[in-house]
Image (spheres, rainbow, N blue to C red):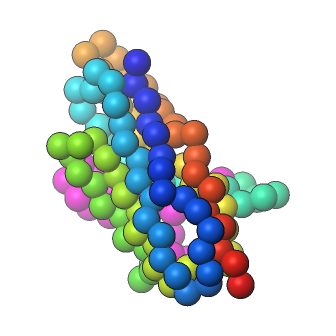
Amino acid sequence: QVQLVESGGGLVQAGGSLRVSCAASGSIRSIATMTWYRQAPGKQRELVAAITSGGNTNYADSVKGRFTISRDNAKNTVYLQMNSLKPEDTAVYYCYARIATMKRVDDYWGQGTQVTVSS
């Protein structure tokens, strides 16, 4: 059974920093791109940042220069370092990955971790 488990969310003041992590576990053969999404109350889920297995990254314009995505392939873990946080970054942050096991390839989502930025 493959799972994605996020951790590291919390409450921080504007201008502060947080790092969220997402670890994949189970009988994993390979993981392609790992992606962070977020969803604020009353808004659609949006892509925040993505990273390929080779380390190529992509960011939403709203977080460029403030957020950094990274991954540890040996640990099947993706990180999102968030600096200079703004109240508009408040959301539930979800990680997503397309994961191959020995039998199939499926899409997986984590349960989400709340990030709240106070002004």
> In the orientation shown, which residue stands out farthest toward the right?
42
Count of labels in the image: 0
Please indicate whether residue 35 sits to the left or right of residue 116 in the image. left
Residue 99 in magenta?
no
Q: Is residue 78 above or below residue 89?
A: above
Could one spot residue 46 in this view of the protein? no
Give residue 2's position: percent from left, percent from top: 40, 25
Nearest the viewer among 7 and 76 is 7
Q: Is residue 95 above or below residue 114?
A: above
Residue at 65%, 74% in the rendered image: 117
Give residue 36's position: percent from left, percent from top: 48, 54
> In the orientation shown, which residue stands out farthest toward the top?
103
Give residue 116's position: percent from left, percent from top: 66, 67
- Which quarter shows the C terminus? bottom right
Please indicate whether residue 39 sits to the left or right of residue 5 in the image. right
Residue at 58%, 46% in the rendered image: 112
Residue at 52%, 37% in the rendered image: 109
Magenta part of the chain: 45-63
Nearest the viewer among 12 and 4 is 12
